Image: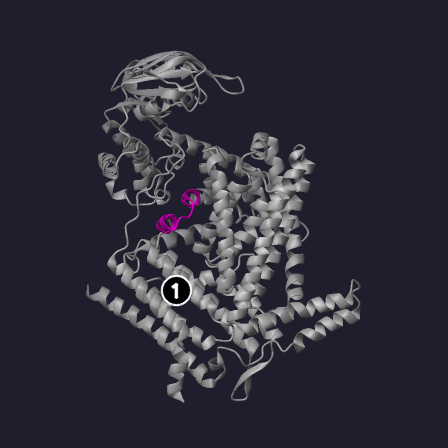
Amino acid sequence: MSALTDSMNTIHSLEEMAEAKTIIHRLHPMVKLVTTFLYIILVVSFDPYNVTGLVVFLFYPVILMALAEIPYKPLLKRLLVALPFSFFAGISNIYFNQNAAFMVGNTPITYGVISFFSIMIKTVFTVMGVLILIATTPLPQISYQLLVIKVPKIIVEQIMLTYRYISVLLEQVSNMYTAYILRAPDAKGIKMKDMGIFVGQLLLKSFDRAENIYFAMKCRGYDGHYLYAKPDPMKKSDWIFMLSTCGMLILLRFFNLSQFIGSFLQ
Amino acid sequence: MIYFKDLSYSYPDGHAAIKNVNLEIKDGESIALVGANGAGKSSLFKLIVGISDIGEGSIQVDGVSVEKKTLKDIRRKVGMVFQNPDDQLFMTKVYDDVAFGPRNELLSETEVEQRVNQALEVLGIIHLKDRMPHRLSGGEKRIIAIASVLSMDPNIILFDEPTSFLDPKARRNVMETLGKLAMTKIIATHDLDMALDICDRVIILHHGSVFADGSVKDILLNEELLLNCHLELPLCMQRCKTCKN
Amino acid sequence: MHMADALLSPAVGGIMLAASAGAIAYSAYKCKDDLDEKKIPLMGVMGAVIFAGQMINFTIPGTGSSGHIGGGILLAALLGPFPAFLVISTVLLIQALFFADGGLLALGANIWNMGFYACLLVYPLIFKPIVKKGFTPRRIAVAAILSVTIALLGGAFSVVIETLASGITELPFTAFLGLMMPIHLAIGIVEGIVTAGVLVFVYKMRPEILESSLINKKISSGLSLKKVSVTLLIFAALLGGGFSLFASSNPDGLEWAMNGVAGTTQIIATGGVHENAADVQKTTAVLPGYGFKSTDGQGSAAGKSVAGLLGGGLTLLLAGGTGYIIYAVKRKKEKSA
């Protein structure tokens, strides 16, 4: 099924991207986690009518995507997922707020329109931020950092295990689905009445698989505790990058660069 | 050394899986455990490493009897390579999978690194150290699964169908790998050609009992014997006019 | 129902992250001592199953549209509430990172909306009591359909609250609700039927799976009504706190939010239960005429000037240009290398 193979490909390509060795990739994962989070928070902290201050925040993702050599195609795919709801919310704003904010020539620009753009831009920026994170940091590394910030071990173990078996399960489901469809040629999906058996079988097989995995673990001495190597500590260069980037972002949040530039045009 | 004495085991539903098995396995032997599906090969393996509980009789590994309280010890002596490497490799990095066993033995991280590198080098896959297992081919996963057991430095390794689902090149690779290993090996397999290639002794299980036990030559060239337990001659023998005489 | 970062304010996002973190910590605590260690790999595999399972397209007869399973109630019935909650959280994290299905700041909200209600509230309070007397296909079906629907409605309701509290959308409360609830009611019933089908199948083939997650008293020692009300009170207090935080940073936003909500409650009060044309008219008349945002007091006076607009456009160009220059330099370096 195309959704399944699509997902497989998406995960694979992100994994491959994360294995590159650019300067951004080599940064400590904690740095990237912190800056991504700060970036998202600052972007969404803009009120709905401050679009000019907001657009300044394009610098961060564009620069990082260039430095990390991340292609723009995956970004477009992600936006397709994230934009629809934002689009709907934005459009409703255009409808519900028709008070004019200012005029451009003879055209009034309403508050609704401004907030529409604000939502759309925020969506694009935040999606870019997360893309940069995942395209430069393999998930296992991110998970290790979660351990550092005291996320319960069991959750980190679950992230690793789930991630490990996603490709296996996607393939299994894909095979099961194909086997079904080939015997129901005009069906456009699993028939609802067959979902019980279809998913049920998948679950039963998965229970068996999990049991085998458990045996394999026990045979290698597993006693309930995963033991991981300690992640590398942060280097001086990591600290410098993190503090300077965060500082700059915070500065940009409160100093309206657009207005500053615009004032030169007046 | 492994001793099986009057070993019996039944499934939870009552069906007998192993019936009165008596065997002696010496150090360093390379044994092919063959039999039709359902003959009891996997059950026997599960009994050795304590995944299933012995019904009657006993198994002794290097003088230690297989019981609940000795399992930790037994599992250090006996490693088992599962048929499906996706069941065996559950970490997100090859290094971590191969390190899993040593880490559970609470070795220091330097010792763990030593064991891991050693295992990977012996098997010729040190270049896969930092890769993610779920991205590798079936053949590569098989070898890594072997490495994950090898890093525990066992005296005995059990292999459950090591060449199933592999393409010829991967299969050849696995066979060569197995040939390199010096410790006691028990290989459950349908691949009689492989058994002919790398094993010196063959044990046939049939309906849970030992049907035959002898050298590779005595067993794998004995067509009548093989047919009696739902097996047949290795393929390479089936066309060979010299051997047939 | 996955919320994007752009639809939340930092305050609401932060509150929901805290709430979910608390729920996760609690679930992890509950799993630590009492969990059969066999469940660890099972939870991991189930996470992958749900992830893959959510991509299965099933056709809904008579409508020609397709549906997907969610998983909260399904997982809770198979694993118990606390492991299920952890699994759902994991799946949502992976979806957010790899597919932009939900944002990172919004992860807390998504875990709450799609995991908390199903696993930690609805399962112990609705599903379990129904099947406690014994598993029969009918009881499973009723329990599943009811649970999935209520959990989904709870989640949808939270989405509305969270979005409105963030002050991002100007969609009025009733309109938003009126959109979200019926849709999710329909989705819930369909998903509930499928969940029921799956559980009935699993029960027929391997009854011990469902029974063991029920019996395991230690893990699923459910939530007493007292705990539930305390949780909801905390949620309300946090949200209320969020409101005031929001208020102090953005008076106009709160004013608008209060207008939107107050306006509709007024309508409900006067209109009473009967919905006649007049009342409906009042509703529709009131909304467009709302003077939603007063122009002053906005931190973004800049946004309203043409200078700001031009400056903004120029900034965009500068940012894009910087990126392009970096690419160009890198290409050149690679070529000469």
Magenta span has B232?
no
Residue situated furthest left in the rendering = C337
Q: Is residue A68 above or below residue C39?
A: below
Foreground residue among C290 and B210: C290
Instruction: Determine which residue is flagged by label 1.
Output: A72
How many neighbours does mark 1 have within 10 angstroms: few (below 14), some (14-19), or many (20 or more)?
Answer: few
Q: On the rendered image, what quadrant is the C terminus of chain C found in?
A: bottom left
Residue B158 seen in the figure: yes
Magenta span has A150?
yes
- Measuring from the top left, give residue A143's x and y in whole percent: 38, 49
| Residue C208, quarter of the rendered image | top right
Mark 1 is on which residue type?
Tyr
- Measuring from the top left, give residue A139's x and y in whole percent: 38, 50
Q: Chain of mark 1?
A: A
Residue at point 58%, 70% (across, down): C254
Q: Which residues are magenta?
A: A141-161
- Measuring from the top left, give residue B241's x and y in whole percent: 29, 19
Residue at point 60%, 78% (across, down): A98
Left or right of A38 in this view: C271: right
Colour mapping used in the image: one colour
Residue A23 seen in the figure: no
| Residue C309, quarter of the rendered image | bottom left
- Measuring from the top left, give residue B119's x and y in whole percent: 25, 34
Q: Is residue B61 above or below residue A3?
A: above
Foreground residue among C282 and C262: C262
